[in-house]
Image (cartoon, coloured by chain):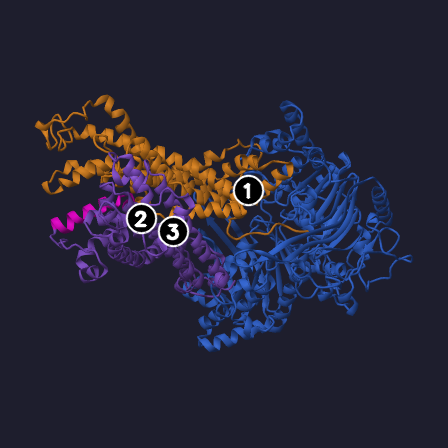
Amino acid sequence: MALLEVIGLRTEIRLKRSVVHALDGIDLSVDAGETLGIVGESGCGKTMTAMSIMQLLPNGGNVVGGEIRLDGRDLLSLSAQEMDSVRGNDIGMIFQDPTTSLNPTMTIGRQISESVRIHRGASKKEAHERAVEALSLVGMPSPAQRALVYPHELSGGMRQRAMIAMALANEPKLLIADEPTTALDVTIQKQILELIDNLKQQLGMAVILVTHDLGVIAGRADKIAVMYAGKVVETTSTRALFANPRHPYTEALFQSLPERSAESGDRLYSIPGLPPDLTKPPTGCRFAARCRYAVDDCRTNEPPLAGTDEQHRFACFLPVGAPVYRTEAEPVAAPTADAVVTERIRESRDRTQAETLLRIEGLVKDYPVTAGLVLRRKVGAVSAVADVSLSVHQGETVGLVGESGCGKTTVGKLIVGLEKPTGGSLLFQGRDLAQAPRTERRRLRRDVQLMFQDSYAAMNPRMLVRSVMREPLDIHRVDSPAERDRRIREIFDLVGLPLSALERYPHEFSGGQRQRVGLARALALRPKLIVADEPVSALDVSIQSQVLNLMRDLQSELGLSYLFISHDLSVIRYLSDRIGVMYLGKLVEIGPAESVYSNPVHHYTRGLLDTIPVADPAVEAAKSSQGIAGELPSAIDPPSGCRFRTRCPAAQEICAQVEPKLTAYGPDNHLAACHLPLRPAAAASEEVQPALV
Amino acid sequence: MTLAPETTAEPPVAPPGSEPDEAPRSMLRRGWEVFAENKLALAAVAILALIIGFCFIGPLFYHSDTSVVNLSAVTQSPGTGHPLGTDNDGIDELGKLMVGGQTSLEIGLAAGSIAAIAGALYGAVAGFVGGWIDALMMRVIDSMMSFPLIFLLIYLSSVYGKSKGMLILEVGLTSWFGITRLVRGEALAIKVRDYVDASRMMGSGGTRIIFKHILPNTIGTTIVNTTFSIADAVFALSTLSYIGLGLQAPNNDLGGMLDVGTNYASQGYWWMIYPPAVVIILIILSFNVIGDALRDAFESRLQKR
Amino acid sequence: MTAYLFRRLLQSVVTVLMVTVVSFGLMKLMPGGPVRAILGSHATPANIAHLTQQMGLDRPLYVQYWTWLDGLLHGNLGFDYVVQRPISDVLFSALGASAYIVGVSLLLALLIAVPVGMVQATRRNSAVDHAFTVFSFVAYGIPTFFVGFLIQQWFEDDLQWVSVQNQVSTFTEALTHPEAICLPVLTLTITTVAGYSRYMRSGVLDQITQEYVRTAKAKGASARRTLYGHVLRNALIPMVTLIGLSLPALVGGSLIVEFVFNIQGIGLVTTRAAQQNDYGITLAATLLTAVVTVVGSLVADVSYAVLDPRVRLT
């Protein structure tokens, strides 16, 4: 018998005027020592499932049917008091955001020992000792001292470790991790996921990993349940799911992943429409309305969760994929059409040789750090961007990737003029923006527009979309008012939005549509370059593919250039001709997308590639590297020499003494700044002039 | 590769307005729906409408001369001719109540409006400009707010006069500091929002940002707190008149009526005390309840966005 | 924390300076000026010139301000020409009774409002919650003077419960005659509880929805433990700030109850002075109470810093 068995779980949330049928007949099981991944898009009910098991539902939430059996005991029949003794003792839980999930006015040690005192009746002293023990278990450096600090004194990664220590202090049988790394940086994400894996083995627990990230699930889960609209639509072992998805929804999800088309450059599949409203769930299959294979039967009858065998179950009348999947079969080899790749590289090179639109040289941005009680004198500087040079050519997409705090967003803000550079120059079509007279600068700036990560936040909620669209045209007094309206209609046509959308408020749109409006506004002034700052990272994967497709289409139609800023290498790789990698304010590597991705030079790039989870279990299993150790050092007093040396596996003395310069590796302008590169430099290696970059 | 993270706080429902063919719903309408759900607030609106009607329209139907002293009819208890009796000067209480209510409401509304405009503008500018100018502007507010309001009003009214116009100015100009603080706090938050960045990037200047982006987005706070400051102004004015430093006879307001009335408390002339007291209390209560409901309406609308 | 405290202290000093500048400005803006105010409208030009010179009013403004400020720092609030006594004599002797009323009311209001707000928040929308909500709205809606009047009616006239014939003006008198100030304190407490309990209620409601509360429950902490171990402390911290912010209103409320119950506090002195057009005392009292509330909020903010580790440890 499985450790945890969920049978026919139904959960409802009572709102003021309606009832949301959040979960409708969920079946799950987890064994000791096993990781079950629950994956799905926002609103599918994956977190609700975790909260139902813990019986920590939000206000109005209620489990209305089914069973939750832990070691054979039905948790739903327990009294509130008995359930208290299960939480934190038999089941531990960690949450998404360790910053808000810890009590800000209580020391870490006390928060961990509280759990020990509740369940073990330990004395204050014993509980504190156990807390220190738990902290050392989760790899907290100097745990005895850290037990005495408050949450705000720790970094995000360390806080999440403290959360894990709290959840595991009583060695529970089951750990539920709800998006445990979503609020963390990729390099820290890898460390935390690794820690959970190790502790699972050490303590023999079962783990339920709830996540939206198919990459995370591919590398960490033994088996997976895919959820859609409050139901499990497919469940099987991780390998079987990725190699042979049977449910059309799972298939569609995989086809919208940019990494699947990164090499071919094909358009991504995007799922039309939106998930159903769960206050009035549709009859029949809940995915039918968005399914490309749906027939009448799908809309009237509900397919049961069944399958060819116990191991692989799915809820579909018309399953896709192979009827039987043999686990010993070779994973389907990715059909790398060499010709296609070569073609893309050739096209990219053409673009690289096109006219240079934007050139930044030696760009520096320092934020002063002040101290002193009365006269706040400057005592130092946060070095956000340090001597970055790069250029963007006509019709080209340059991707900029790195962890948060690496300075990529600041580069974007400097380019669009939201921040003033401390040093260096920005040349747009050969004109220096800093030295151009005011009117010319205004005119030049019109050609560079910014697309925001969250278009909703970038639109005044009190303005109609029409006014939002009019604002740039009004400010620049473009043409006559009638002409402005005509232009807006034209652009809406272009980005595929109905004209009726103009009379609505931003909050009335879904995430994907907002991103379209955001793009439309960026296009209003007919710019030549669009700086896109994480434009898809807040979107579900199926919506993300719509926006990426649109950006590509517009590029070929209007000859736009993009500077695409993202932490997500797969998205960057799919869209970019060239990729630049930033670390702590420095550009450490830049080159053609394929070359950087498959043949990196810098140890940081290598580490980043190994750290970022890929939605392919085979790739994840093959990863040997431990990712990147440690945490991002402070940018106030960055390390001397190479800024990456404190976390670099190959660092030597020279790295601390001499700052490496960007050097050419290969003939195609692949540059990297490393003393001990992963592969030898190009034959005629010499320092590269910024102009070449 | 990523699906959007799921938050636990919100139930899984499709985003509002996801179907583009449904009729556009304005934010105002949604706010009104939340407000209308609050039965207490609706009652307050009704009561306030009744009081305003009573004070401003009532005199058209109920005629009485509140300026002529009639020593032959002092402190009469309610009866025919004088539904609410007469005061110590023989003036009809019901007529006096209408006139007094008018004065209290006029001064309260006018002072509240001054407070709203001054407070919102000052706060928006301070928050937007930031830096040492903001710090200085806010220290001025801090220092003004540390004066106990009634002390300041006593001084101002005794030095600068107790006429209706002067009292509007005096009360209005001493009651905008609270709004300023709140609006400035919001302005600080709004000016780092992406939509202000977007507008700045397009080339807007400070004035445009303050009037197009900051002020419209603090309108909720301003409206809610204007409602509260009207209540506070009525409160302050009645207190001032009660201690004899507000409006001077014969221009009575409700506080002044109470000042006179409570002097006769021991004689049991209840009609000189409770009618004006009830009207004051209902005015203050109604504005406070409405303000509270408006705050809920604005907040819930922001949550639902 | 030292940096925070120092900055906060500096802020208070600046605020107090601003308070003096505003008061000085008000004094200068008096119609006809202080000399006319003292001598009345029938003064001869010679008299005016003489007094102007005697009071140093012919010197430059900043000199006058400086002299005046220097006097303030030495406790010299000026000389009152109406009662022919130093203003500080008049005000300081009245300060004790007011301080006593404000202090006791504040303490009582907190002792009542904190548990009431907590009960309201934890039993949201119950009969208890609604009852207290109605109470606080009504108590907040009735002008303080009328609350005082009603209390006076019920307790003194109807119940013959306490007799307030003693004139309480000093701190010791207030201490030895608690019955003399218990009705004014009751009045001020009622109006203060109304505001405080609303604030506490929404503070607790705010904290209950925080994610760390969910974490505590996930640990297996009982509802009781979560409330007392986690929510209460975090909800009390903002209450400290509220005390600082509400001080001016409390001092103003004290003026009203002093007037209603005829207690020789600073409020009654001020009211009487204003009624006799004695501007000097009125302005000095306004200035003095403002300075006292600035110091009060400073104390509140310092306690806030001590209570909140996020401030204490930075």
**Location of residue A27 in the rendering, given as x and y in whole percent from the top left corner:** 56, 57
For residue B285, say whether it is visible. no
Judged from this view, the residue extending furthest toward the left is B72
Q: Nearer the viewer, residue B186 or A637?
A: A637
Q: Secondary structure at mark 1?
A: loop
Judged from this view, the residue extending furthest toward the right is A683
- For the residues labelled 2 and 3, the Cα–Cα distance comes to 12 Å
Colour of chain B in the rendered structure image: orange
Depth check, mark 1 against mark 3: the one in front is: 3
Q: Which residues are magenta?
A: C132-158
Amino acid at circle 1: Pro
For the point 45% across and 68% down, the residue is: A85
Taking the magenta stretch, the answer to whether it contains residue C154 is: yes
Amino acid at circle 2: Ala
Residue position for label 2: C284
Q: Nearer the viewer, residue A94 or A6?
A: A94
Residue position for label 1: B15
Q: Which mark is residue C144?
A: none
Residue B254 sits in quarter: top left
Q: Secondary structure at mark 3?
A: helix
Colour of chain C in the rendered structure image: purple
Colour of chain A in the rendered structure image: blue
Chain of the residue under the numbered disc 3 shown in the image: C
Depth check, mark 2 against mark 1: the one in front is: 2
Amino acid at circle 3: Leu
B144 lies left or right of A508: left
Q: Which mark is residue C69?
A: 3
**Location of residue A424 in the rendering, given as x and y in whole percent from the top left corner:** 74, 48
